[in-house]
Image: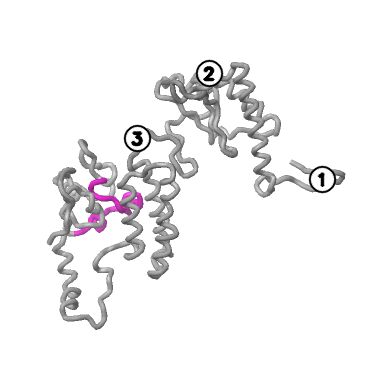
Amino acid sequence: MEIRHKNSSLVGGFDKELDPLSPYLFVMCMERFYQVIEEAIVAKTWQPIRASRNGPLLSNLFFADDIVLFAEANCEQAHVIKHCLERFCGAPGQKVSLPKSRVYFSNNVSDSKQLEISSCLGMEATTDLGMYLGMPSLTSRVTRETFGHLCEKIDRRLSGWKTKYLSLAGRITLAKSTLSTIACYSMQTAKIPRTICDDIDRKTRRAKYCKGRCDIDMFEPKTGMSNVWRGITDNAKLLCEGMRMEVGNGSQTLFWDHKWVTNQPLSDLATEPIPLSIAGATVAEMWEINHGWRWEVFAPYLHSDTLKLIQSHELRMDSEVGDLVY
């Protein structure tokens, strides 16, 4: 696009990314698209849907240049939507990015009809619209997996090599200004499961005080210590070798970092690098009620002999929280 000042010559091109008028131009363009949709609705060619039996009619949702369009699931409506998009894009000479666009269907639409409508629109069908503005676009029952991305975001922030060399003051600043605020945005619009909150709290405390780990061998011996304390530190290795976690219901036992099934943590027995998404998982998170162990999650990273030892353990969710025993 080229712009001319009044009573002057051509001043140059228009960059939509840098020009301060860009947001206003977006609003005006989307307002015109809204008018195109309204014209189709008035002409009764576009059939909006209702979110509930007595709810309002929905035809579109706009946020900046992101659009969600609603219509009945048939090819006639697909052609109407396609015509409105072509009419809108024809004016400025733009095109819809079909590879980035998706079609979402309700559960009562057959697979054959979904394929037919997707072909009419030239867009791929999907069962998940993914994340939008940091929140899941579609949710049914909220589970730990729904907000698992929050824990993954914290893990990515802590995985950077710079965080390993921060002083105590730096780690406190990291925990307060970064880690503690990652979930605040999601908490404004949704109730986050307690297990996610506990996991975030555990990761934050580890990053703050333990540089991401809380092993006893990471603490340096105190200079000028008493004989009692010197005896404890001198025998810390022997003490650790005889200590293990009593699993209980598994909610407080770390699957990879605690010694609960063998004489050493499972992380030391891993045959491949453990993904960050499951590195801080508890034993309870690796157990599915009424189904048993979630083998598909951890089995690829452990030897068959270790898996046999895990198979001999059965988790009881009605048990008490496990303790550290010797």
According to the image, label 3 marks what residue? Answer: 141
Q: Residues within 10 Å of mark 3 (few under 14, many from 20)?
A: few
Left or right, 322 with respect to 31, comes to: left
Which residue is labeled 2 in the image?
A: 75
Q: How is the image coloured?
A: one colour
Judged from this view, the residue extending furthest toward the front is 54
Amino acid beneath label 2: Cys
At label 3, which amino acid type do we have?
A: Arg
- Distance from Cα at disc 3 to Cα at disc 2: 31 Å
Asked whether 26 or 268 is in front, the reply is: 26
Residue tagged by mark 1? 5
Q: Are marks 2 and 1 in contact (CB under 8 Å)?
A: no
| Residue found at x 37% / y 50% | 151
| Earlier sequence position, callout 3 versus callout 1 | 1
- Using the image as rendered, state which of residue 223 and residue 257 is in the foreground: 223
- The answer to whether 24 is drawn above or below residue 125 in the figure is below
Residue 255 in the figure: left or right of residue 325: right
Amino acid type for the residue under numbered disc 1? His
**Looking at the image, is 211 positioned above or below residue 290?**
below
Percent of width and height locating residue 39:
64, 22
Image quadrant of residue 161? bottom left
Local secondary structure at mark 1 = loop
Figure check: 181 above or below 139:
below
Among the two numbered marks 2 and 1 on one chain, the one whose residue lies closer to the N terminus: 1
Furthest-right residue in view? 7
Residue at image x 66%, y 31%?
A: 32
From which residue to which does the magenta span run? Answer: 264-285
Q: Residue 277 colored magenta?
A: yes
In the image, which is nearer the foreground, mark 2 or mark 1? Answer: 1
